Image (tube, coloured by chain):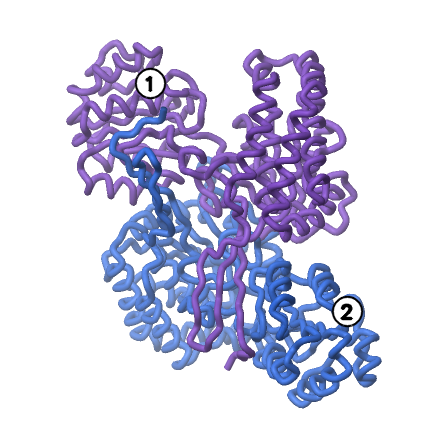
Chain colours: A purple, B blue
Amino acid sequence: MDHAPVPESAPTVVADMARRARAAGRMLGHSPTEQRNAALRHAATALRAARAELLAANARDVAAFAGAASFRDRLTLDDARIEAMAKGLEDVAQLPDPVGRVLSEWSRPNGLKIRCVATPVGVIGMIYESRPNVGADAAALCIKSGNAVILRGGSDSLNSARVIHAAMQAGLRAAGLPVDAVQIPPDADRRHVADMLAASGLIDLLIPRGGKSLVERVCREARVPVLSHAEGLCHTYIHAAADPEMARRIVLNAKMRRTGICGATETLLIDSAIAPMLLPGLVEDLATKGCTFRADARARAIVPDLPPATEQDFATEWLDAVMSVAVVDGIDDALAHIVRYGSSHTEAIITEDAAVATRFLNETDSAVVMWNASTQFCDGGEFGFGAEIGIATGRFHARGPVGLEQLTTFRYEVIGTGQVRP
Amino acid sequence: MDHAPVPESAPTVVADMARRARAAGRMLGHSPTEQRNAALRHAATALRAARAELLAANARDVAAFAGAASFRDRLTLDDARIEAMAKGLEDVAQLPDPVGRVLSEWSRPNGLKIRCVATPVGVIGMIYESRPNVGADAAALCIKSGNAVILRGGSDSLNSARVIHAAMQAGLRAAGLPVDAVQIPPDADRRHVADMLAASGLIDLLIPRGGKSLVERVCREARVPVLSHAEGLCHTYIHAAADPEMARRIVLNAKMRRTGICGATETLLIDSAIAPMLLPGLVEDLATKGCTFRADARARAIVPDLPPATEQDFATEWLDAVMSVAVVDGIDDALAHIVRYGSSHTEAIITEDAAVATRFLNETDSAVVMWNASTQFCDGGEFGFGAEIGIATGRFHARGPVGLEQLTTFRYEVIGTGQVRP
């Protein structure tokens, strides 16, 4: 993907950071796997050694925090969370190196050998809110994948971020890698975010992690490619030929296992042929677990107690124990609903009919489509990626979970023996 | 990659076209391979049948054209060019279907099967200048890859474009596919270009083809992902351990085979250790073919007749029989020059030293890097892609030649047997 040319010497703090990141990233990208792994292990050691300092810094952040209790909890670190961060760094060190993988190779009749090789992206800008651990997780994935990263966390967590950042740089230093590979802005000036969004040619990729308004702002204003999901309005569609017991089990999990994650099902679509038999029991299962409902008229004709849904309800990512319910007439109706209201994140069909499932898989235009499985499986760990930095719902590069491999791009290497083009 | 959310019902001609393209693209994307191939063959037949009409329309375009002679030549169609267009459609019909390829697949310990499957991008916007055949070529690649396309050619070629467009739609119609899969704006209003650039959520990908100013404008203003190259400032680096005869043969081809293509070498970098022996003969070879030079002081110390190069010369894509020449001290110096002046398109090293070549391949941050081969091989046909719609120098999705496979993206399909997430 192309973006605007490099602005000549934009005199901002971010531009200066990005230039140093570019130079550091080049060295990181060409460094041996073991050196990057050593940096991660050293960073884990440094983080554990800084435990008391980090708890004190975090206590200052929490004391100054004036927001909602749920955000305060995300902001708060304790021994267990710090150990989990350190362990996360060590876990990433154990993962396979995504850089240098030969993605494909072939030979031409003239003897040229062509291979497509995974390379680091370059300079990544991470813009996130509240949770201080996101900085450590992102730095780990970027170091491992040979990318330099600029971490712009929420201003609420600046004291915590500084201690975590120092540990990451200590790890890089101990491994003989340039500390500029992981940087944070020197202060909480909001202008740094605007400068990161405008840093075309300086930052190669932005990854926002946070609330919908943050992500939407980044997507709207960025002059740099963005990997993100603004929302996960996931659907589970129970086809007429579903196994009823499987449908109940999957829907219960897809909605209620964790309601606040982006892969949670927000809307249940159920075929009119099976709804009278299945919907009452499903509603009872879910209601027992604390779920409430917004249902269309046809669903309410079957379970009259369900509250009515508005048009807007079907466009709402609840992230809560609330489910929108609509009765549909077969797969075309279900696909039309998903096209209209979906966010291209994850959709699932439950059916024993392989032909219908194949149509659903082929014709659903989302990053992840599932057959007879819970939408909550949309996760880097569950995909086997080892770790994830987020989920992407755009149409290019990474779609779905973003792990180490998704933090690489590629180049073609053409190897000849003196060939010239006729 | 994410971009801004869909503007609600922007009341433009382009928005209306894009919505119809979206619906048509869905049908195209799910259609059998043979149906898309039939559309291409029918379109070829329709194009040949419209030969007289197309020549007459083109004659009106050419008569009204007031630009330079070289652009007039690009605009002008004759029997051979029309036949080449028709043959091109049939050739694309012969290529393998890029849609539905399984790019990777694996199983998880819980029995989930995950596969990554190639899918069409969706709606592509092609913005191009002068050459009417670009419309036919682009339409063929888009139809084959299951994408709808909006073709916005130069206003100079509107009469020609209309006849070509009618042939493409006749092909779609004859194959039972929706004609809205290939559309052109109803008139030459320049506002349509601005509307295409702003069509975030309506158009998924823009591909500009034309001069540097067009491409740069698209990259600068687009709110939609762009695949393009603004320029190809390609370098060939003759390392000290080069085979001199091979170096002369390759450089002559890389510079002079065709000077106007983006893969032509613009700058020669030559090691100080080999330059005194090699540069005089190389200059003689090239000068004999009509090449002129812009050389740095060290090159002029060896071949005093060479005209001096300015700093700006090394940043210039000549697209002509002109070559910038610099003497460098080894690979680090060469890489630094390429980082400073390169356009991330194609660079080549000529050397018999495999370790140095490996460093060059690893550390050159361009879409295509070559060892002992002519940079003019950066071409979809030469890569074996069968056809190309352009070259991309961005960092994501497609880099280098853009063929059928590069006009697809992917989704994950997750196939379960009732799994729920613990």
- Residue at 65 percent across and 77 percent down: it is B242
- Which residue appears farthest toward the bottom when viewing the image? B288
For disc 1, the neighbor class at 10 Å (few under 14, some 14 to 19, many from 20) is some
Q: Are marks 2 and 1 in contact (CB under 8 Å)?
A: no
Q: Residue at x 19, y 42 (%)?
A: A355
Residue at 49 percent across and 32 percent down: it is A230
In the image, residue B220 above or below residue A217: below
Q: Nearer the viewer, mark 2 or mark 1?
A: 2
Question: In the image, is A383 to the left or to the right of A65?
Answer: left
Checking the image for residue B329, the label placed there is: 2
Residue holding disc 1? A309
Secondary structure under badge 1? loop
Q: Residue at x 28, y 50 (%)?
A: B30
Residue B10: x and y, percent?
Answer: 47, 40
* Residue B20 showing in the rendered view: no
Viewer-closest of A309 and B160 = A309
Most foreground residue, A264 or A219: A264
Q: Amino acid at mark 1?
A: Ala
- Left or right relative to A390: residue B333: right
**Quadrant in the rendering for residue B387:** bottom left
Q: Give the distance between the C-alpha atoms of the residues marked 2 and 1, in whole angstroms.
A: 72 Å
Q: Give A89 or B213, whichever is nearer the viewer.
A: A89
Q: Quadrant of residue A411?
A: bottom right
Q: Position of residue B359 (x, y in %)?
A: 63, 62
Q: Nearer the viewer, residue B296 or B371?
A: B371
Residue B107, image x, y percentages: 33, 41
Under mark 2, the amino acid is Asp
Name the side, left or right, on which B35 lies relative to A320.
left
Q: Position of residue B341 (x, y in %)?
A: 71, 62
